[in-house]
Image: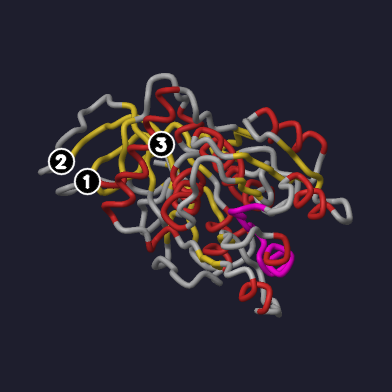
Amino acid sequence: MKAVVVRQWGEPDVLKLKEIPSPVAGPGEVLIGLRAAGINPVETYIRSGVYPQLPDLPCVLGGDGAGVVEAVGDGVEGFAVGNRVYVAGILGGKITGCYAEKVVRPANEVFTLPEKVSFAQGAALGVPYATAFYALFNRAAAKPGETVFIHGASGAVGLAAVQLARAHGMTVIGSAGTDDGMKLVLSQGAQHAVDHRKDGYLHSVQALCGADGPHVILEMLANVNLQNDLDIAAKFGRVVIIGNRGTIELNARSAMMNELDILGVALWNCADDDLRLIHKGLIAGLENGSLNPVIKTEMPLADAALAHAAVLQPGALGKIVLIP
């Protein structure tokens, strides 16, 4: 089969399309013929060798994908050849990542893909939607009637959070860096969108919240925004850090005076039982139409390096997926 293989850590050009042996499903595993693979920023950090958890080399990256079951290993129940499924793993590993024509995954990382959901959309679920769900509900304990401010709401995780929060009965404010991005955020259910290119945009967020400020803030770039988040959050508010690319100096008095919680999110810390419940919730949302992954770009598997460069560019408008 064809797969994008990493033999050394480095820049995007280390992603090489190669012919490698097809994987075989062992006990408790499922072999899937992939129709789409999701590109996530975390995979660019792994590829560059700076991530805290690195697979062994050589490896095939990609935790997220969607396709059709081709074989099931001994002891696997609930899946049969021909089933439409999506894969939601945290990291790729030796010849089992989703940047490939086929993937083998433990059965507990494989989920039924509703008929109305495309394979490209299925490949957008694992990291973005599970992260957004985990951040909002498991970590921040977001409640109906509260206001959430989502930084970078036009990206894959941001759009997932917009849809989830709105379905949960929250008031949603999202930021984006382009006019098209703000239109997209509003079209996906946010009541308000602000332009984070403009000075003072956080004052607009605070004004939209009245006297309080947002009860929950989802932060995608903490090293830039975290102090400002603490300054505008409502009393007893929760700031959830989903993304960070450096260090920051904080005035802790901001958190102290309003008794704010600063919460980190790393999806690999989510307990298996919680993760199963998260995906049950996601599948229900897909089936009832409240969740609808937005695909920005579909690219051929050979363009994995271009996809890795694109996923870190500002102005995201949904998900980038590879098509084997």
Amino acid found under the numbered disc labelled 1: Glu
**Disc 3 designates what residue?**
282
Contact between labelled residues 1 and 2, with CB atoms less than 8 Å apart: yes
28 or 165, nearer to the observer: 165
Q: Quadrant of residue 82?
A: top left
Rendered location of residue 22, percent (x, y): 32, 44
Report the magenta residues as a range.
214-229
Q: Nearer the viewer, mark 2 or mark 3?
A: 3
Contact between labelled residues 1 and 3, with CB atoms less than 8 Å apart: no
**Disc 2 designates what residue?**
76
Name the residue located 38 percent from the left edge and 63 percent from the top edge.
269
Contact between labelled residues 3 and 2, with CB atoms less than 8 Å apart: no
Rendered location of residue 13, percent (x, y): 63, 57
**Which secondary structure, mark 1?**
strand
Q: Nearer the viewer, mark 3 or mark 1?
A: 3
Of the 4 image quadrants, the one containing the N terminus is top left
306 or 89, nearer to the observer: 89
Rendered location of residue 6, percent (x, y): 49, 60
Number of numbered discs present? Answer: 3
**Disc 1 designates what residue?**
29
Mark 3 / mark 1, whichever is N-terminal: 1
